[in-house]
Image (cartoon, rainbow, N blue to C red):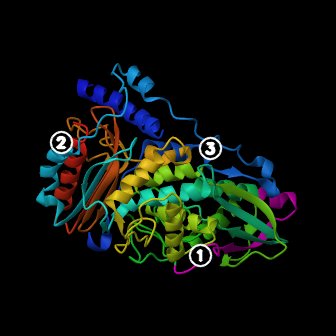
Amino acid sequence: MPVIRTWQLAAGAAVTGLALAAGAVLAAGPWESGQREAERERAAGADRAWTSGAGRADNRPPARPRPAPAPSAPAVLSALGTPAPTGPADGKPGELGEELGPLFADPGLGPLRTASVVDVSTGRQLYGKGATRAMTPASTVKIATAVAALTALGPDHRVPTTVVADGKRITLVGGGDAGLDRAALRTLAERTARALRDRGVTGVRMAYDTSLYRGNPLHPIGMNGNIAPVTALMVDQGRIDPRAAGYTERSHDPAGEAARAFAGMLGRAGVRVTASPAPGRPAKDSRPLAEVVSRPLSALVERMLTDSDNDLAEALARQTALATGEKADFAGAGRAVRAQLAKSGLPLGGARFADGSGLDRRGRVSAGLLTALLAEAARPDRPELRSVLTGLPVAGFSGTLRARYSDTTPGSGLIRAKTGTLTGVNALSGTVVAPDGRLLAFAFLAGRTTSRDEAQDALDRLAAALVS
């Protein structure tokens, strides 16, 4: 292994430790893609589907402990043989401006560009260009969605998918788990069949309930391979090919597809569904039969940010709406996200949360808001937000930054950042550790760009300059 790669891996570990220490196109839409190894492990893991038979709460997983206090920076740096900073270094915005200014002037960033770089430990802005101007954020808005969901629900929250029964009629009730896969659905079918057979029932009528979410399920961009219709019940995110990742064909009726798949699994488990599943709500006297729950919200946030998962983003925005009493549609989710961020005193001037994923071009956030969100997630007294930092893709290693930095790029392994890409819109926002040991949060937004590749290269150079 080349020496530079070994150094990058060690320094990458320092980034994580310091982050915790500091606070711990066209119709196709965006080009976001990428898959982390942890998700392949997740697909094979048995802990994906927790169940409770016949309504028994004692089969739920134990409560996940809240994050421990962040380790100190000196311990992290000493492990690398690097002198630890003795205190906050004096910011030198002028020097940083001299470094970033020529890079920020790159024509690849188009005519609309804003920037914000802050020292996370002090909140001091070290570099800013139009930092308060609201811009189309593309997928960097997922940082806001993540902070809002974690604030409203907590990192340990799990989203249920349940089956209830009224005699020989069962109802599959969607709870909004956009991460539900066929392995979990199969587990739910097997537990449901077992509960029914214990009652002497071998044939049932079946309905499925998606009433938890309201409004038009179709995203404003229409049917698109980047996102399925937003519904409270889906399996494999409505993908026609469950093995596909990134942009791929989606079902027009993900809830119906999930219900039909469940009925088939139920039949293979020994209980026949006597007619095609139909939409419907449970009878008032229905009783619980079985349940599966999602992975903890913190894990869903990490997956959403690393892979830029649009389906999860919209689901988490709606879960935020449900938790705060808002209507679970696009508008209600936007109001809920804004209200949660306002509670933390974040700078929301000009912000508009048109959706949770950033696919809607009507969304607006400022570079200053993005850096404030990252600084909030790094605060020692906000450990519930830690997955916002740990979920950011690592340059050259994971998610949507896997292929954007090479082994010899200065920022490889050192930059953690959320990408944002729509036709004519490019953005990058995340964290780096400066050479003097300070954790910096940055956001660079560009609009009316004419070349995706040129814009991304310019953004990557800006972020890399912060660590050199």
Name the side, left or right, on which 381 lies relative to 427. right
- Of mark 3 and mark 2, the one earlier in the sequence is 3
The amino acid at mark 2 is: Glu
Spot occupied by residue 121 in the image (x, y as percentages of width and height): 40, 41
Magenta range is 193-216
| Residue 177 counted in the magenta span | no
Q: Residue furthest front?
A: 90
Disc 3 secondary structure class: helix
Cα–Cα gap, marks 2 and 1: 48 Å
Is the Cβ of the residue at disc 3 closer than 8 Å to that at disc 2? no
Q: Is residue 50 left or right of residue 9?
A: right
Residue 146 can be seen, yes or no? yes
Can you give x and y, in whole percent of width and height, for residue 189 in the image?
70, 59
Q: Is 212 part of what is drawn in magenta?
A: yes
- Ranked by sequence position, the earlier of labels 2 and 1 is 2
Residue projecting furthest to the top:
81
Residue 327 marker: 1
In the shown orientation, is residue 65 left or right of residue 397?
right
Q: Is residue 80 above or below residue 109?
A: above
- Sequence order check: which comes first, mark 1 or mark 3? 3
Tell me the quarter of the image containing the C terminus.
top left
Label 3: few (<14), some (14–19) or many (≥20) C-alpha neighbours in 10 Å: few
The residue under label 1 is which amino acid type? Lys
Q: Dot 2 corresponds to which residue? A: 95
The residue at which mark 3 appears reads as: 46
